[in-house]
Image (spheres, helix red, strand yellow):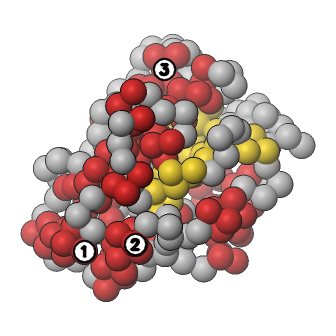
Amino acid sequence: MDAVELNVDVPHSARIYDYLLGGKDNYTADRAAAASIVEASPSLPVSMRANRRYMVRAARHLAQERGIRQFLDIGTGIPTSPNLHEVVQQVAPQSRVVYVDNDPIVLVHARALLNTVPEGATAYIDADLRNVRAILSAEELTGTLDLTRPVAVSLIAIVQFVVDEDEVYRIIDALMAPLPAGSALAISTVTAHNPQAVSAAQEYTARGIPAKARTDDEVRALFRGLGLVEPGVTLVHRWRPDDEDAAVDDTHVQMSGGVAIKTG
């Protein structure tokens, strides 16, 4: 793999996320940013772990209950087991997953995302969420996914960094437009209904990483034209919770989300 240049003096959302999850792929600037964010929002590490478990449950639902075998995960972040392909390939080993991120440190660790079972396939694209055309035309995607068959698009803890509503609508519309009926969209994002979440978004913004907290109505609007799966948009630990998440207090969770199916 070619050498990549890491800007370690500027905090990055993926590395902050890694640090707060207990990872080691982060730097002084990321840890300093994380400390300020957690000071304003003490429950953020709990919320991030709940969000990770939500990703696992949503992916498993789409593979197990909806029969989807192709996944496009944008804003992947630094690999943290279980990664999405590990979840869905436990359900169906033939599942195929394309990961997308634009942080050089994620690229450095991308080989961990490519450790697939023989029956399945994974690929990694170095691209920005906003450049949908580059993502959909990348050889890594066209060589891995068949866009005539259903694809689940996963936008986990990423759209809060697109603060303009017209822009986020454009991105989601462009991602979903070429996909057939039966495809899916899974989202989690910062909720405006938790004061700590709002404070965290403000701290991210102050650190040069613009972020926006959204109301449940604003999150529902991201799924317009799609059919929301029960229970709809909710705090992530309340989306089809297991025993661990059922015990988490709502005040500690700063992310809301949902899963929807394209019906036409």
Residue 46 relative to residue 256: left or right: left
Give amino acid for label 1: Ala
Query: Which numbered disc, 1 or 2, marks the residue closer to the eye?
Result: 2
Q: CA distance from mark 3 to mark 2?
A: 37 Å
Of label 1 and label 2, which has the lower sequence position? Answer: 1
| Disc 3: which residue | 89
- Mark 1 is surrounded, within 10 Å at the Cα level, by few (under 14), some (14 to 19) or many (20 or more) other residues, namely some
Residue 197 relative to residue 224: left or right: left
Q: Quadrant of residue 80?
A: top left
- Above or below: residue 29 compared with residue 124: below
* SS for dot 2: helix
Residue 4's disc number: none
Q: Horizontal and vertical percent for residue 24?
A: 13, 50
Residue for point 39% across, 27% down:
243
| Disc 1: which residue | 40
Residue for point 19% across, 55% down:
19
- Mark 3 is surrounded, within 10 Å at the Cα level, by few (under 14), some (14 to 19) or many (20 or more) other residues, namely many
Query: Which numbered disc, 3 or 2, marks the residue closer to the eye?
Result: 2
| Disc 2: which residue | 195
Residue for point 32% across, 45% down:
49
- Above or below: residue 202 compared with residue 215: below
Of label 3 and label 2, which has the lower sequence position? Answer: 3
Give amino acid for label 3: Gln
* SS for dot 3: helix
